[in-house]
Amino acid sequence: MPSRRILRLSGADTDSFLQGLVSNDIRKLDQGLVYAALLTPQGKYLADFFLCRDGDSVLLDIAESLADATLKRLSMYKLRAAVEIGDSGLHLQRGTGPAPAGALPDPRHPALGWRAYTAAPESDDGSDWDAIRVAHCIPETGIELTPDSYLLESGFEALNGVDFRKGCYVGQEVTARMKHKTELRKGLARVAIDGPAEPGTEITADGKPVGTLHTRAGDHAIAYLRFDRASGEMQAGEAYLRML
C-alpha cells in the first residue's frame, strides 16, 4: 500500500477555504510546497500534509493512514464553499539526489530533498529517511506526531509549518498563546543513546518520568521530553540517554 495519498482540491473558494483551516499561509503556494497542519479547536494535532499548486487546483499530500479521516473533516468544514475534494490519481516521488523536472524542495529542511507528483507508482531513491529525520529532529506522522501533539512542541516553527501572521485558523488561538505567552516545558529533542531500547519506551531520570523514546538511528534518537527533568543522564529500558 502506498504510504501517501494525493488529494485534489478545486473550485473558486479553494484558497480561502484552506486559509481558514490550516496552520500555514496558503499564499506561499506561489513559491513552492507548503507544509501545514490541521488542528482541533483546542490546538492539538489532527494531520500534517504538504500543499502544492497544480494549475487552478491544490494538491494535498498526506499519509495514507490519515487520508480518510482528513477527507471527512474537510468535507465537514466545506459547508457551502465552492470546493471539490477527491483523489488526484497522482503518486508521490521523493529523493535526496538530483531533482527531476517538476520536483519541488521539501520545505521542512534541505536535507529532506525534493518531492514530485506523477502518474507513476509511488517511489523514492532509497534515502535513509529515519536517519535524516533523527539528525534534524523532524517528526513523522503517527510516530512523533500523535493526537496529543502540539505544533510548537513538535518543532513546526523550525520546519516552516506554521505562520503567526496569516490570521485565524482552527486551533490558532492556542498555538499563538504557546508562542507568545509561555515557555515550552516539553517537546521533541535529539538525544544520544547508548544501549538497547525500543521506540515507545518510557524515559526516566532519578526514577521520575521524563518522556518517551521515538525514532532511533544508530546512537541518536528523537525523544519527547520534559525539559526541566532532562538536563542530566536519563534511562530508557537498558539504554542511557542524554539530550543533545
Image (cartoon, rainbow, N blue to C red):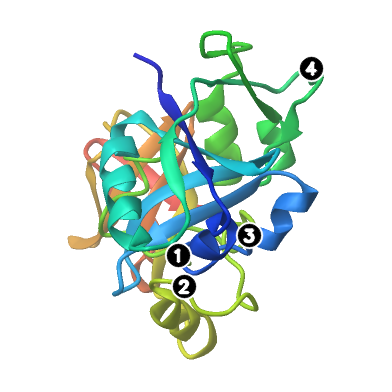
Quadrant of the image occupied by residue 79? bottom left
17 sits left or right of 78 in the view? right
Q: Position of residue 197 (x, y in %)?
A: 28, 32
Helix, strand or loop status at disc 1: loop
- Alpha carbons under labels 4 and 1: distance apart: 32 Å
- Alpha carbons under labels 4 and 3: distance apart: 25 Å
Q: Any mark on residue 129, and which?
A: none
Please report contact status of discs 1 and 2: CB closer than 8 Å, yes or no. yes
Q: Position of residue 19 (x, y in %)?
A: 55, 65
Please report contact status of discs 2 and 4: CB closer than 8 Å, yes or no. no
Q: Which residue does the numbered mark 1 point to in the structure image?
A: 21
- Alpha carbons under labels 1 and 2: distance apart: 5 Å
Quadrant of the image occupied by residue 52? top right
Q: Which residue does the numbered mark 2 point to in the structure image?
A: 169
- Alpha carbons under labels 3 and 2: distance apart: 11 Å
Q: Which residue does the numbered mark 3 point to in the structure image?
A: 26
